[in-house]
Amino acid sequence: MMFIPSPFFNLSNRISRGVRKLATMSLTSHSSTFLLPNLPTDDGPALTYALVILNQSLPKFTPLLWKHAKVHICADGGANRVFDELPGMFPHEEPSEIRKRYKPYAIKGDMDSIRTDVLDYYRGLGTKIIDESQDQDTTDLNKCVTYIRDSLNPEHPNLCILVTGALGGRFDHEMGNINVICCFPSMRIILLSDDSLIQLLPSKHHHKIHIHSSVEGPHCGLIPIGMVAGRTSTTGLQWNLDNTEMRFGGLVSTSNIVKENIVTVQSDSDLLWTISIKKD
């Protein structure tokens, strides 16, 4: 006798496989310690930070990120921002001294935004200039992340890339930057502005997010990206999700509130995690 499974049987099997998959996922921890004045020494395996600066206004905490980062790369016109705006963050010091102190290791991009005087200045200081004008199919951020991945990742396996100027300005630029973090799901990349941060939570991991309430929160969100998130569960939020479906055109967890020091997230689809950054 031939056994023909019912639709309910198939659905139950799919759910069972999904539950088993979630149960076997590894745990990944996240922490915005880079926003703290000093990096803690007892917060698990130390991360190596790389800083990428895009062509938008610098966040007020840029000098702090610069201090924590091991390498500093300007994406094309981001060099204009470092040259023009960083001296203003140190009003009691000579601009020339600030520019020498905050010298990027490299400037990479298609070179359509950087001013000639800025390019010549940093070239004179020994900054590496990497002209990728022949590549018009990828964004300057994509070029910088690829460079960091290929040149630094083997040496620093616990690498985290911090990106300033990624949010704000033109909406298509913002979406392009979000697309970049989706193109490199195995890398830790955090997009930053004065107001908030965004990072990808890949579905192949469970996520444990340590909240530093002195510098971030309480407003937060979880946003499905690229597909429907069929089952998402959280703890630590005012409005937790319990195997909840999220989709554009339906429920999206925006304007949520962090209620605990640790937030956990499990999902069958990649999600964007965003949290507000506190003003001074």
Image: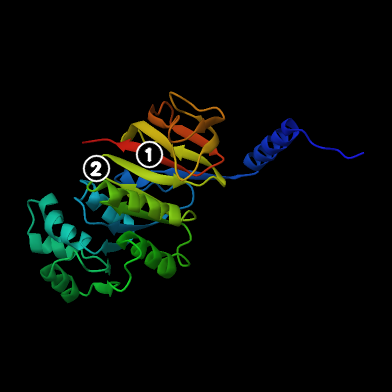
- In the figure, is residue 87 to the left or right of 230? left
Q: Which quadrant would residue 93 be assigned to in this image?
A: bottom left
Camera sees residue 43: no
User: Secondary structure beneath disc 2?
Assistant: loop
Q: Quadrant of the N terminus?
A: top right
Q: Dot 1, how many residues are within 10 Å of its Cα: few (below 14), some (14-19), or many (20+)?
A: many
Q: Which residue is mark 1?
A: 274
Rendered residue at 21%/52% (across/down): 56
Camera sees residue 193: yes
Horizontal and vertical percent position of residue 21: 65, 42
Horizontal and vertical percent position of residue 270: 50, 44
Q: Which comes sooner in the sequence, label 2 or label 1?
A: 2
Horizontal and vertical percent position of residue 243: 57, 30
Rendered residue at 25%/56% (across/down): 54
Rendered residue at 34%/49% (across/down): 175
Q: Quadrant of the C terminus?
A: top left
The reply to whether callout 2 and callout 1 are in contact (CB within 8 Å) is no
User: Secondary structure beneath disc 1?
Assistant: strand
The three-letter code of the residue at mark 1 reads Thr
The three-letter code of the residue at mark 2 reads Asp
- In the figure, is residue 257 to the left or right of 173? right
8 above or below 268? above
Residue placed most toward the observer, 209 or 230: 230
Q: Which quadrant would residue 161 be assigned to in this image?
A: bottom left
Labelled disc at residue 194:
2
Residue placed most toward the observer, 204 or 45: 204
The residue sitting at the right extreme is 1
